[in-house]
Image (cartoon, rainbow, N blue to C red):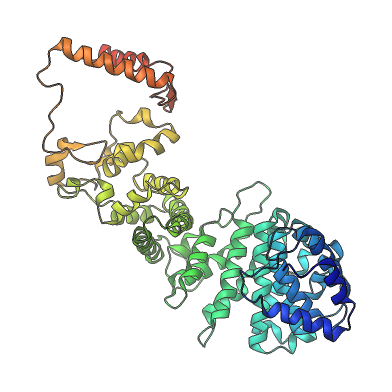
Amino acid sequence: MASLTIERINEIFSKNPSEIEKFFADLNARHTQPNNIIELPTENKMLLGEKISEFLEIPDLAPTLLFTLRICSRDVNGIESLLSTQLCEKLLNFACVLKNGKPFTTVPTLIEAQKSLINTVFHSSKMRSVLKEHNERLIPFLAEFDESRRKTSKFEWIRQLDDKTADEIAFFYHKIAFVATAKCKDIQKSWPHYPGIVDILMVPLERLLHKKTDPTDLQFKIADESLKTFFNIFCREEKDLPAIEKEQASKASRIFRDLILSDSLPEIVVQSAVHCLSVPPLRIDLSIVCGDPKAPPTQKEQEFKNMELTERLLAIIERKCDEIRELGTDPLATESTEMLGPYFQFLSRLCMLNKYSRRYCRLRIIPPLTAEEVQKRPEEQENLRGKLCRMMMTPTATKEVVQAFLFIICKRSTDRFIKYFGFGHAAGHLANLGLLGTINQAKRDSDSEDSETEEYNSIRDTVNPVTGAVYPADRGSILAGMSDEQKEFEAMKLVDAMNKMMEAGIVKPGTIGEDGKVREVKHVLELIDKVQELDDNSDSD
């Protein structure tokens, strides 16, 4: 705002509190939309921050000035100048998060402080640094506003809140927790060690599952923020990250399962629950994820054959694949694809632990091939196999976890993987695993188990292993009718052209090394030597 000069700022704050409040209330009213920002030079922002910090002590001004601070903190440019350490601490104090801070003031002041914290923690390293020293004060508030605890809270002001206001305050605390654990590595690393953190984060989720009346939109949002915070603090796989205790892990897994299987929750909550179920420190309890959801928690099962959760995840994946395809080149397609990664991570872990889950996924995704199916390439199919094959072609990190999952349900058989998805789609993953050298090894007895039909066997020799579909009807060669001398001449022209492209850096041909991984060849003749070596080892005369 060009008119908010240094002189103007000094002039405004020289007036009485009611005039100051009126000016900034009018300013705030013109910037209510989230994308509206107040653009100021760095020096002006610094002065404004100093004045706000000074006048926040006046109770009648605090909510209005905190609103102004929230608007100014939408803009990352100059935010470090806007915020002094003193202002950061005052902000934490008004949000009741400061150690040894002053008592609670008013609900409007608290809520405006919370909203400002969300913006400042997101944009400012200075704010995150100050919050790091006080962050544990935030954790108890994540459960304190639940109706089961609010009436017995040690804070009188919390006991006096009505349900709607309590939910609003709880939502902002959960939002602060999510942003803090996403943006501050130190907070992210320390929270898993906080006693009872899992139980605290489960409180809003249990409320959704056990609430007798329909939850409000705000209660859904609180649950989603709690799930995202859980994911943030446990999504890493590091030595210093403690495994979740067995009792807490079972409780969390059961809650996540029930959320995913619920038919009354928003899609965003279900998606966040799946993401939480995939975190490495949460061990998979087969009695929960593959047991009877209606069975008592104490009931033990010998075999884990309940595929209700597995089927729900596959159904969500298939629906998401359809939605992504409809989006086409929209950037949302890439974002949606990335969000599917944890689904495949969890299913991969599950299939490695439970043979029944692996078999179910295999029959659901890659049932025995028929002659009709191989008339088209795998990625051209409209079944689940085709949809996942198309996902293997996306330029995202998700394609790698999709490949890993599909390789697992293929029982880590290179031949089966190639048969169902074509060498063109399988080569990258096999190369990363160093398994390209195993392609021509003798098949295992299990490689054909339940994966071929009689009609497929009758046409299998006509299937192109690179594409995974039958060869086109016309398989003629441009070399047909040439003499051996002509063929050799054309071959040498090709070698010369490839060598020129290699020298220019246009292409980098590779070959399979002794470790089964692809290595770059130094000269195109290495490829010819490899062919000669194979000919020398032939049993034919």
Task: State whether residue 244 appears in this view.
Answer: no
Residue 166 higher or lower than 174, as above or below: below
Quadrant of the image occupied by residue 436: top left
Q: Residue furthest left?
A: 481
Q: Name the one closer to the observer, 356 or 335.
A: 335
Q: Quadrant of residue 332?
A: bottom left
Q: Residue at x 42, y 76 (%)?
A: 263
Q: Position of residue 162 (x, y in %)?
A: 68, 90
The quarter in which the C terminus is drawn is: top left
- Whole-percent x, y for residue 487 in the image: 18, 15
**Quadrant holding the N terminus:** bottom right
Q: Where residue 178 appears, x then y in whole percent? A: 64, 65
- Classify residue 213 as left or right of residue 46: left
Q: Camera-side residue: 332 or 105?
A: 332
From this viewpoint, is residue 13 visible?
Answer: yes
Q: From the viewer's perspective, is residue 202 above or below residue 522?
A: below
Q: Is residue 505 above or below residue 174?
A: above
Residue 76, image x, y percentages:
69, 59
Q: Quadrant of residue 91?
A: bottom right
Q: Is residue 159 above or below residue 282?
A: below
Residue 426 shown left or right of residue 69 in the figure? left
Q: How many marks?
A: 0
Which one is in front, 93 or 170?
93
Left or right of residue 220, residue 163 in this image: right
